Amino acid sequence: MTAHIDTSACPSPVWLPGGHAQTLYGALFASSNRLRFVRERVKTSDGDFLDLDWSAPGLVLKPKGRDINQTGLPKSSAATRWIEPEDKEIIGHHQDAPALVLLHGLEGDSDSRYVQSILQYFRARGWLVVLAHFRGCSGVPNLLARSYFSGDIDEVEFILNAVIERSPRAHWHVAGVSLGGNALLKYLGERAAPDRAPSALKAAVSICAPMDLVAAGNRLSEDRLCRWLYTRYFLRSMKPKVMEKASRFPGAIDVTRVSRARTLRDFDDAYTAPMHGYANALDYWQKASSKPWLPYIAMPTLVINPRNDPFIPEASLPGTTEASNAVILHQPAEGGHMGFVTGAFPGGLTWLPARLAKFFNAGT
């Protein structure tokens, strides 16, 4: 049993050469419309919550003749109001039609450009779409000292069950980006055996997932340019979130080590690993990696990884013998990390959602 390989190109423009340029331009400058959402807060079994941002045929951003409930929504949120009972009915009656749930990457949210480009594309074609925020990523701190992490397959399973429960007759598809992609692949290999996978779930896509977290973690922690370009950006939002948690849970977090963290390894050593049951960053990276689980995936799955992704060493990408025959490994030469910019300047972000659509519709 071996995976299929696809090396067809993401036609990156000549005016945007290299993985770093493609990554940064795609994340910060590529043009994108702004899709608005209706937000639902879902309680978890451990006393916390997740926020789901929905868009669907029939949902309106401001019901006629009614004041909308925006209480507690962050001003920068792509969600415009809280979900109402009639919205739930519309979502629940999305029958025999396609639906997509998206799992974002590290510190992503429903306003991230890659989220917007993917969900706009499918929503414009009549799909029910939902962005599932991991804990603390919807602009509101979650209630517990714990957060989200790259190997949290329990959270992936909870999200899939929650969205499918709300629209059980839809034809569900799932895509995970970067951290969310790794967690999704690990779930598919470890939990989603044919007799356990939700029957409504038809196919899955992972995009730019760091399936070998040791290789990716070392790259982002040790490469000087990666530390300067990316690690500083991530830590700028992650550290304040954890310090806020420390004020609510005295003694639960080593604030000195967190405040001194300069790399992702430092941060994961100080917070992510011990908070989520791992001995240290290396233990976390080894045990949370999805690569060892690729041979066990039974669901039709597309795994997209550009070979010039600055986050992920090319040598760490899986080969055909390292995944099951349910998996297509698409490894274009260009694209960066969630860049995938194509076309004449200023370029656009249409290649990636079109690639997902091709797989969801034709299985190739």
Image (cartoon, rainbow, N blue to C red):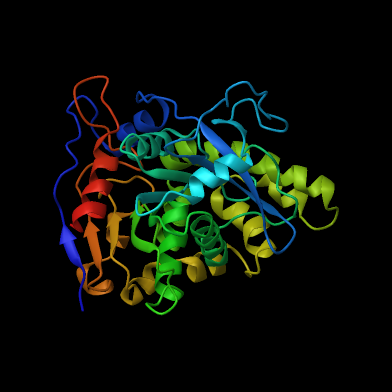
Q: Position of residue 199 (x, y in %)?
A: 40, 69
Asked whether 317 or 189 is in front, the reply is 189
Residue at horizontal 67 percent and vertical 59 percent from the top: 44
Left or right placement of residue 189 versus residue 1 in this view: right
Residue 277 shows in the view: yes
The residue lying furthest to the left in this view is: 8
Left or right placement of residue 181 versus residue 159 in this view: left
Q: Position of residue 174 (x, y in %)?
A: 39, 55
Q: Position of residue 1 (x, y in %)?
A: 21, 79
Q: Position of residue 213 (x, y in %)?
A: 45, 61
Residue at horizontal 65 percent and vertical 24 percent from the top: 66
- Residue 203, compared with residue 32, is above or below; it is below
Q: How many marks?
A: 0
| Quarter occupied by the C terminus | bottom left
Residue at horizontal 80 percent and vertical 58 percent from the top: 252
Asked whether 268 or 191 is in front, the reply is 191
On the image, which quarter does residue 209 sit in? Answer: bottom left
Asked whether 186 or 272 is in front, the reply is 186
Asked whether 202 or 184 is in front, the reply is 202
Left or right placement of residue 295 versus residue 88 in this view: left
- Residue 346, compared with residue 274, is above or below; it is above
On the image, which quarter does residue 339 sit in? Answer: top left
The residue lying furthest to the right in this view is: 250
Residue 137 shows in the view: no
